[in-house]
Amino acid sequence: MSLIALIIVILYLALIGSLILGFDKVNEFTLKDVTPENRFSILIPFRNEAENLPALLQAISTLNYPKTYFEIIFIDDDSEDNSVALINAFQKKSKLNISLIKNIRSSNSPKKDAITLAISQAKHPWIITTDADCVLPTYWLDSFDCFIQERQPDFIVAPVTLSHYNTFFKRFQLLEILSLQGATIGGFGINKPFLSNGANLGFKTDFFNTVNGYQGNNTIASGDDIFLLEKAINHPQTQVKYLKCDKAVVTTIPENSIKSLFAQRVRWAAKTSNYRNIFGKLSGLIIFTMNAALLCYLLFAISGVVSYKVLIYVFIIKFCIDFLLIFKSARFFNQEHTLFSYIFGCFLYPFFSVFVAFTSVFKGYKWKGRAYRK
């Protein structure tokens, strides 16, 4: 048993340690005062987001970028609340170039359908996707523009974090997001990008058309961000970059209930079996094995099969290495003050992650009032 624990710990230390080193290799990008050059089409699919849209619309109205240099396309995916009315009212009083179109379902993934439809109608050479429950920073587009001018990328992954984390339940979600963002940045730092987030993603329209968009994975309900990243990595002419800039951070809100949190995380986990990125698959396997091993060793220790020392040693090692990655991420997002919740959260996370992983394998999930199967 001790030998197995040692192998698992070594693999986990190697993985997380490499991501920690990679995190520092991605230099923070400083926004500069340059003349805007790039034009953007911002795509926002939505379904029943009336509660969250006011904050997004207010953020859109305060974007600093020249109004003639970007358009916003909202794609309604059969909303049943007053989301459409809110957007129509904003559209009438705003001087921005705003379009509202109706989604046309053609696959098992409504979001991919919505993005594909919007891109077919987009006017500008750059696409940026975000979500209706997000808030955009004032210099969001300026950051993308300056980064494009300086680094000449074709595909940009940008930072996302949570806001309104005033309870332990919500801080638990934030800590997980911080770990995912740390792994995202770390992957770019070691030249093995494997994670992205559709709430803050930019790419050239030509790239999307060249790789035939989501063709090949549109039977999978989720994964509009990850599968597009995989195509970008495998496309030899595509430069993929991470925009590590505090002025580009998009914030979203945590889930309000355990049920909705599980549904969201199961939706995220359900697509992992379809990953083609070997490093991404291996990383997921190592992380799952470490969390599952902790639970197994807990049961073995209670049963007297192994010593509690083995369990304690493995847990302490995981506790320390995970904290280093989350700390780096929290420092970048200026959210270090939430780290006190890590002490209790790290005891819960192995149970949470293993349950989500098993549920994603054997069950479907519901999202936005719709049921999905793998």
Image (cartoon, rainbow, N blue to C red):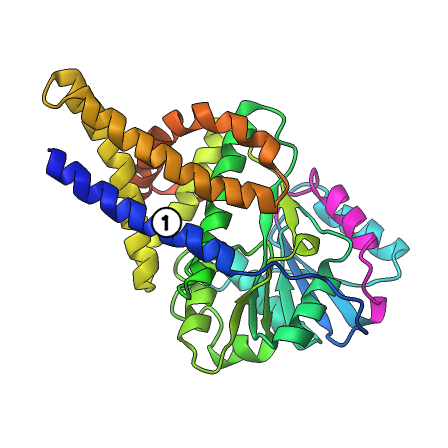
Residue appearing at x 62%, y 51% in the figure: 131
In the rendered view, does 229 fall on the left or right side of 84? Answer: left
Please indicate, yes or no, whether residue 371 appears anywhere in the rendered image.
yes
What's the magenta region?
Answer: 47-68
When asked about the image quadrant of residue 68, the answer is bottom right
330 left or right, relative to 74: left
Is 159 situated above or below 360? Answer: below
Q: In terms of depth relative to the viewer, which is nearer, 229 or 179? A: 179
Amino acid type of the residue tagged 1 in the rendering: Gly
> At which x and y percent is residue 306?
12, 23
> Relative to residue 111, is residue 47 depicted above or below?
above
Question: Which residue is at 18% across, 44% downward?
Answer: 7
Q: Is residue 62 magenta?
A: yes
How many numbered marks, from 0 up?
A: 1
Instruction: Say whether residue 114 is left or right of residue 221.
Output: right
Residue 158 vertical position relative to residue 256 in the rendered view, above or below: below
Residue 201 part of the magenta-drawn span: no
Task: Quickly name the residue at label 1.
Answer: 17
Question: Which residue lies at the image location 27% right of the left edge and 39% below the top edge?
Answer: 290
Other-residue count near label 1 (Cα within 10 Å), few / some / many at <14 / 14–19 / ≥20: some
Residue 367: where, in percent of width, then height? 49, 42
Q: Position of residue 16 (x, y in %)?
A: 36, 48
Q: Is residue 373 visible?
A: no
Q: In this view, does 6 lie to the left or right of 341?
A: left
Q: Position of residue 123 (x, y in %)?
A: 71, 76
| SS at badge 1 | helix
In the picture shown, does residue 160 fall above or below 165?
below
Q: Nearer the viewer, residue 309 or 351?
A: 309
Split into 4 quadrants, where in the image is the N terminus? top left
User: Considering depth in this image, is 190 or 75 the residue closer to the camera?
Assistant: 190
Please give the name of the residue rendered at 63% of the width and 69% of the height, measured from the top-left corner.
127
